[in-house]
Image (cartoon, rainbow, N blue to C red):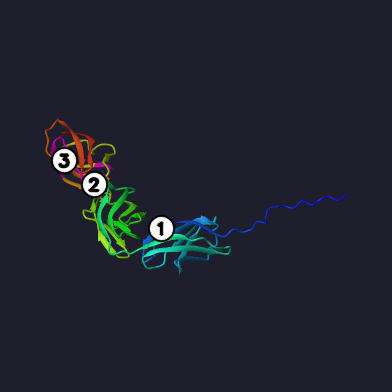
């Protein structure tokens, strides 16, 4: 009696699956190219070629898992094109990418237009032709997260600003030129703090005093209701020095440090 041989009814599966392209992020960009684009899919590892409408893109990064490929888009005429990825397993399905003609950028406003000197504040610049834009705030590069498909809104995160705060220019630069945001951006200084109390804590009018703390930029000092004279603040905003103003012998007054960001009690001073 012979033993029947069982054969699978399923066809043999290929050992390798060609690359599958699921999307392109962002899906739009300037005709000048040069902007970073991330291709997302499956089996993209070992990509040897990425084409935008038949034009080669520059591959600048690949995910070891084959899930993403990062490229610099090539220049191309305005309009939609098909993007494909090729590796040893074959060529992917196409995904759509649209080139947008960009003239000189227009930067009408930034929102919010103020934030802490530490930076890290998300913002949006409203205007037009903002595709592929970079942003500087007070001369420092902001982190650009991208633009909406129409190029009318650019999203980003502010860099750190000057410790003393203040208003600084905001400039958007694209392949089409540069534009400044009217009114710029205002960095808000942090509230002052005081470590310990005024030194010395007693003495006569005309004596020198010192107050130590943080965020003391732009400080004035009151002894009671009378402002001290010759007040200076060090570069780091951590030390205030000055001259004790006139007062009545035998009285004790509160010493207050006042800055544009607020005021803080620096202890008391007794006139001898």
Magenta span of residues = 211-229
Q: Is residue 128 left or right of residue 258?
A: right
Of the numbered discs 1 and 3, the one sitting upstream in the chain is 1
Q: Quadrant of residue 130?
A: bottom left
For the residues labelled 3 and 2, the Cα–Cα distance comes to 19 Å
Q: Which mark is residue 244?
A: 3
Circles 1 and 3, Cβ within 8 Å, touching? The answer is no
* Helix, strand or loop status at disc 2: loop
Q: Position of residue 132 (x, y in %)?
A: 35, 60
Looking at the rendered structure, the secondary structure element under dot 1 is loop
183 or 211, nearer to the observer: 183
Secondary element under disc 3, as helix, strand or loop, is loop
Instruction: Please tell me whether mark 1 or mark 3 is closer to you in this view.
Output: 1
Q: Residue at x 77, y 51 (%)?
A: 6
Q: Which residue is mark 2?
A: 217
Residue at horizontal 35 percent and vertical 56 percent from the top: 149
Where's residue 36, x and y in %?
41, 60
Residue 81 tag number: none
Give the farthest residue toward the right: 1
Location of the C terminus (image quadrant): top left
Q: Are marks 3 and 2 in contact (CB under 8 Å)?
A: no
Position of 175 relative to 204 (above/below):
below
The residue drawn where x is 27% and y is 40% is: 193
Q: Is residue 53 above or below residue 1?
A: below
Mark with earlier residue (1, 2): 1
Classed neighbour count for the residue bearing mark 1: other residues with Cα under 10 Å, few (<14), some (14–19), many (≥20)? some
Find disc 1 in the rendering and name its residue.
27
Cα separation between marks 1 and 2: 46 Å
Disc number lying in front (3 or 2): 2
Would residue 164 be seen by someone viewing this image from the given angle?
no
């Amino acid at each position: 009696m012979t033993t029947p041989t069982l054969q699978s009814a399923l066809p043999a599966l290929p050992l390798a699956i060609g690359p599958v392209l699921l999307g392109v992020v962002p899906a739009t960009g300037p005709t000048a190219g040069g902007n970073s684009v991330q291709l997302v899919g499956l089996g993209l590892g070992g990509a040897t070629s990425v084409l935008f409408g038949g034009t080669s893109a520059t591959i600048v990064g690949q995910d070891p898992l084959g899930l993403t490929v990062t490229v610099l888009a090539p220049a191309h005429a305005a309009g939609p094109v098909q993007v494909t990825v090729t590796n040893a397993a074959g060529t992917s399905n196409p995904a759509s990418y649209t080139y947008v003609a960009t003239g000189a950028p227009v930067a009408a406003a930034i929102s919010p237009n103020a934030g802490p000197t530490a930076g890290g504040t998300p913002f949006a610049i409203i205007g037009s032709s903002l595709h592929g834009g970079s942003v500087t705030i007070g001369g420092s590069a902001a982190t650009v997260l991208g633009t909406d498909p129409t190029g009318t809104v650019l999203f980003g995160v502010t860099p750190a600003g000057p410790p003393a705060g203040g208003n600084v220019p905001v400039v958007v630069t694209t392949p089409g030129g540069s534009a400044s945001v009217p009114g710029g951006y205002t960095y808000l200084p942090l509230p002052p703090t005081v470590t310990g109390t005024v030194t010395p804590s007693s003495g006569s009018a005309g004596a020198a005093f010192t107050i130590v703390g943080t965020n003391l930029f732009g400080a004035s000092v009151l002894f009671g209701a009378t402002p001290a004279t010759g007040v200076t603040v060090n570069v780091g905003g951590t030390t205030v020095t000055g001259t004790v103003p006139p007062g009545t012998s035998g009285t004790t007054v509160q010493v207050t440090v006042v800055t544009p960001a607020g005021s803080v009690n620096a202890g008391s001073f007794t006139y001898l």
